[in-house]
Amino acid sequence: MLFPPVLAAGIAVTGRRSGAGVRTAYLVLTAGGLLTALVAGAEILAGEQPVFYTYNIVPFLPVTFAADALSWFFALVIGLIGGLVSLYAVGYVTPDRDRTGGYTAAFAGFVATMLLVVFARTIPAFLICWEAMALTSFLLVIRDHTSRSVRSAAFIYVVMTHVGTSFLIFGLLLLVGPAGNLDFSSLAMFAHQAEPWRRDLAFVLITVGFGTKAGLVPLHVWLPRAHPAAPSHASALMSAVMIKTAIYGLLRFGVLILGPGPLWWGGLLTAIGAGSTAFGALFALLEHDLKRLLAYSSVENIGIITVGAGVGFVGISLGSPELAAAGLTAGLLHVVNHAVFKSGLFLGAGAIQHATGSRDLERLGGLIRFMPATAFSMLLTFGALSALPPFNGFISEWLTLQALLQMGRTSPGLHVSVGAAGAIALLALGGGLALATSVKAFGVAFLGQPRSMAAEHAHEAARPMLAAQLALSILTVLFGLAPGMLLVLILPAVGMLVGSTPALGSDPFGGVLPLRPLFLAATLGGAMLLPFALVRLLGGPLRSRVSAIWACGVESTTRMQYTSTALAKPARLMFAPLIGGYRSVDEIEHNVSPYFVTAVRYQAATAPLIERYVYRPASTLVLGLAHRLGKVQNGSVRLYLVYLFAAFVVVLLAAH
Amino acid sequence: MQWILQAAVQLLFILLAGPILQGWIKTLKARLQGRAGPGVPQPLFDYVKLLGRESVVSQHASRIFRAAPFVAFGAILTAMLLTPTFFADAPAGGAGDAIAAIALLALARFSLALAALDTGSNFAGMGTSREITLGALVEPGALLVVTALALLVPTTSIAGLGSALSPGPTWLLALAALGIVVIAETGRLPVDNPDTHLELTMMHEGMLLEYSGYPLGILFWASSIKQLLLLTLVANWFFPTSALLPAGAAGVALGVVLYLGKLAVLGAALAVVETSTAKLRILRVPALLGTAAALALLAVGAQFVVGL
């Protein structure tokens, strides 16, 4: 069962020498990915018992893999998105002999290690695959290593992911019982009856560890740097799939291994998630680099998923399986939906970069004329990002809000209800800012007049790229109209996490399900046609003509349009205390008279508040400590002999 | 088949009542300001006249500009169809709930904002930037009002939320919050001035600036239906009378009369608010919208303190 994806990766690795070989490799990955997704779906529906494969590479580090509903679900996501992104890469990657061969191997390795992570069943297996995933993604990020910003971004990424992994290792080791068994079922048995302090500490460490990989605030600082630095197919995979493996880890370790915990576990997750949503959405609005904007938007959506997971944890703590099922279903549905539309968006951003050479919104404009198919697909995926009906983003955000409402209803007190209301407010704010971001990004990039020569000479993307993008955007509509097909695949996993499988027909919210997406879409379609009838009935034929726009009597130039920075200005002013930063406008040229300025220099920046107040003190502390500790090693052999002798004496005394 | 008849009657009513309500508010405002006013049916005549006019389209515009009025009208009409008017059930009530209605209004805003940017005009960009930011700030208030009601009953459908509240502190706080949201969403003073197209007051009107002829007629009609929707929500949730109605034709007639009366009173309240306040500086509007969210949050908490 596990071998199709690994085999595909292997073929990709061996066939990497020439340009045609690279394309073949990516095609193999496409087929392998989609096949994996189909197999995973079939396995979820079949509902077989897990089968274990054990490899004893090192005697005391057992490496075991097995499959259950949760693993298959994440494998489905990885396979589907990995397959479509590989199809895109067939058209995107230029056969550059030196780099592309090894790069393709790293890409294939990345997909394979992600798949292995979700099937691992012992601590060594999980950590080996986790680390391999981090290393292969580092190789993907650092492709353009001649650029200083890319090197810095990759460095920050690799440091942050290892910091997170170290927290994770500590947390996992806390749960190893006295017998020293490292497989997950032994961990679960020990953890279920461990002391509360040990379980709480393990939960916090695991949350920090997976939160770093997921990109939750304040551990997100690597995301807006690393995702733009990587090429688009790698960014798409990292943003859409890799951060979801962190959610997998949180659910596997937090729910299945740690078991029911106190209420504050779920509350912490919901609070962090809601904060990340609002924060990510705000900073996405302020960006004018298209891929950084999408990276911050990923922070926002990971926040939404974490809120769903948090409600699930609360439900488990309160002993209410319906609430837990509601929250976890919402979170897992958003995992799929976000993966679909975010990868579509990154692929579109890559198409824009390919066509114009720039991902700076201030240099784009009017691309809808030159890239109509890409524009159409990005319109659909931006609509999904803004959680609008009839797209899939709306369904999962709706479910998350319903889960929060249910949490407020079944709560034992004021704090949970007000907490749920606060989370709803933050999610609503994030959703509204996401809509503003979508309008800005799509409007400035595709609509209006071109703002630079590069945008005027854009061309449509290659056919494989278009195929992948259109497939993903059609999926956003399909999953939005018929979420039942996804829910059927999610519910077995949820049942495994909660303990009892909720039935699809019955409503987890204790009433009649008040949303029917197909009916809503049909009503929407009919209502959109009604104005046609109104106009024909009451006015006559629909006549229109094209003319120039009014620009105060002068000819309208492309410089008169609103820029991306200008569209975000009200938000920048209104949220100024949260953003900090500075703004300066200097006049640099005037013609004839100082009253007729002909050129100004405008500079604005947001202050990196989290880096300044959280990371700088932390790194100063750590480096200072390391410096002081370093004095222990001063190079004198005699001092080292003294250390050896002292250690010997201590060991003798201890053994006595 | 009775369902289809009811739906058709309500659809016709919605199409007529939107402009008539707009005319009612305009005439009241005029009388309060010492003028005669345009007359209650005048907006309806204006919109119908516009539908017959030719549309002038910007040279830079694409299909999005031409499609947006239909998308916006469709979204707003669908949201209105999710709301019960003078019958107990909404025409399409099973399709969506209050959250879906808010999301449909967001869809309308999305399509209009993109259409504005499509023209390549600078005035339109100004309206868009303000409208999308303030739209983001209105969402928490609106959803928190829905939350305050939805925590009291196990549903979020618009008809179901009508039975959530009874008079008390929660009712008052939620009404205040929803009132501010209604003023912001209908684009009335003190948030935005619906009568002018000046730069200082350009938000919703700014996005429509480049439209003319039949698309403009469609968009004006859609705005009037949106206003009708918001006032209907206030009427349904805070002044519910469906329980008082007897069965049969007499009940339906009484329901119609009561509904029209509520709309008239709420419209008059809007006119009074508009005439008695000045426009807020745009940087002060987030404070107002934040107040709405805070009031709704208090409404959520109030049900625990007093038990209602």
Image (cartoon, helix red, strand yellow):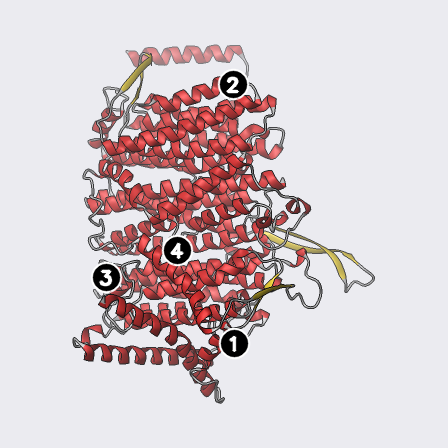
Q: Could you tell me which secondary element the residue under label 2 belongs to?
A: loop
Q: Position of residue A379 (x, y in %)?
A: 49, 49
- Distance from the alpha carbon under mark 3 to that under mark 1: 39 Å
A493 vs A301, left or right, is left
The residue that mark 4 highlights is A428
Q: Mark 3 belongs to which amino acid?
A: Leu
The residue that mark 1 highlights is B195
A619 vs A503, left or right, is right
Instruction: Provide the chain ID for the residue under circle 2.
Output: A
Residue B152 disc label? 3
The residue that mark 2 highlights is A633
Which is more N-terminal, label 1 or label 3?
A: 3
- Distance from the alpha carbon under mark 4 to that under mark 2: 55 Å
Q: Could you tell me which secondary element the residue under label 4 belongs to?
A: helix
Q: Residue at x 71, y 65 (%)?
A: A554
Asked if the residue at tag 2 contacts the one at tag 3, i.e. Cβ–Cβ closer than 8 Å, the answer is no
Q: Are both tags, 4 and 3, on one chain?
A: no
Asked if the residue at tag 1 contacts the one at tag 3, i.e. Cβ–Cβ closer than 8 Å, the answer is no
Foreground residue, B308 or A36?
A36
Q: Are both tags, 3 and 1, on one chain?
A: yes
